[in-house]
């Protein structure tokens, strides 16, 4: 109805599927920039809008990889999704008092 009540952030790419010592800086940067910084930037603007308009809910798509499960040769992806989980928990604590619920 012209507002932003619910936002879903689903940012994710998979690159550098080699052992961690062989991941290129380009692949590492691309994965972290997309999967973590992309979610953070989306939330930053969603939160600003929701603060001005009475609150809302943000859902970030994370992964069991990183926080609870590991597989070989996807270190950048696993790191990025664990970071999304941590970012989500931090943002939830920061903004719950403004009527903004944030979950992963």
Image (spheres, rainbow, N blue to C red):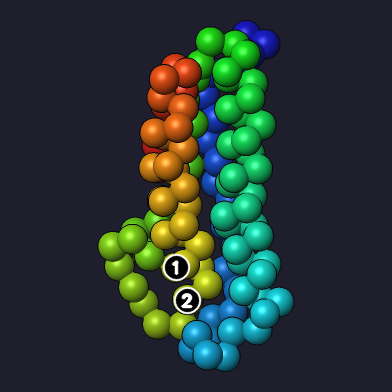
- The residue located at (61%, 66%) in the rendering is 31
Where residue 1 sits in the image (x, y, percent)?
62, 8
Q: Residues within 10 Å of mark 1 (few under 14, many from 20)?
A: many
Measured Cα–Cα span from mark 1 to mark 2: 5 Å
Image-quadrant location for residue 103: top left
Q: Which mark is residue 57?
A: none
Q: Secondary structure at mark 2?
A: helix
Q: Residues within 10 Å of mark 2 (few under 14, many from 20)?
A: many
Q: Is residue 29 above or below residue 87?
A: below
Where residue 95 sits in the image (x, y, percent)?
46, 27
Where residue 84 sits in the image (x, y, percent)?
47, 52
Q: Which residue is mark 2?
A: 75
Q: Secondary structure at mark 1?
A: helix
Label 1 close to label 2 by CB (< 8 Å): yes
Q: Is residue 47 above or below residue 59?
A: above
Quadrant assignment for the C terminus: top left
Q: Which residue is mark 1?
A: 78
Where residue 28 sits in the image (x, y, percent)?
62, 74
- The residue located at (46%, 83%) in the rendering is 73
Q: Nearer the viewer, residue 51 or 39?
A: 51
């Amino acid at each position: 109805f012209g507002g932003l009540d619910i936002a879903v952030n689903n940012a994710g790419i998979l690159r550098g599927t080699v052992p961690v010592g062989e991941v290129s800086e380009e692949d590492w940067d691309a994965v972290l920039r997309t999967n973590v910084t992309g979610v953070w930037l989306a939330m930053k603007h969603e939160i600003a809008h929701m603060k001005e308009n009475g609150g809302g809910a943000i859902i970030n798509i994370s992964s069991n990889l990183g926080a609870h499960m590991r597989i070989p040769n996807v270190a950048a992806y696993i790191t990025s999704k664990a970071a999304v989980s941590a970012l989500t928990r931090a943002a939830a604590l920061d903004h719950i008092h403004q009527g903004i619920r944030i979950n992963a």
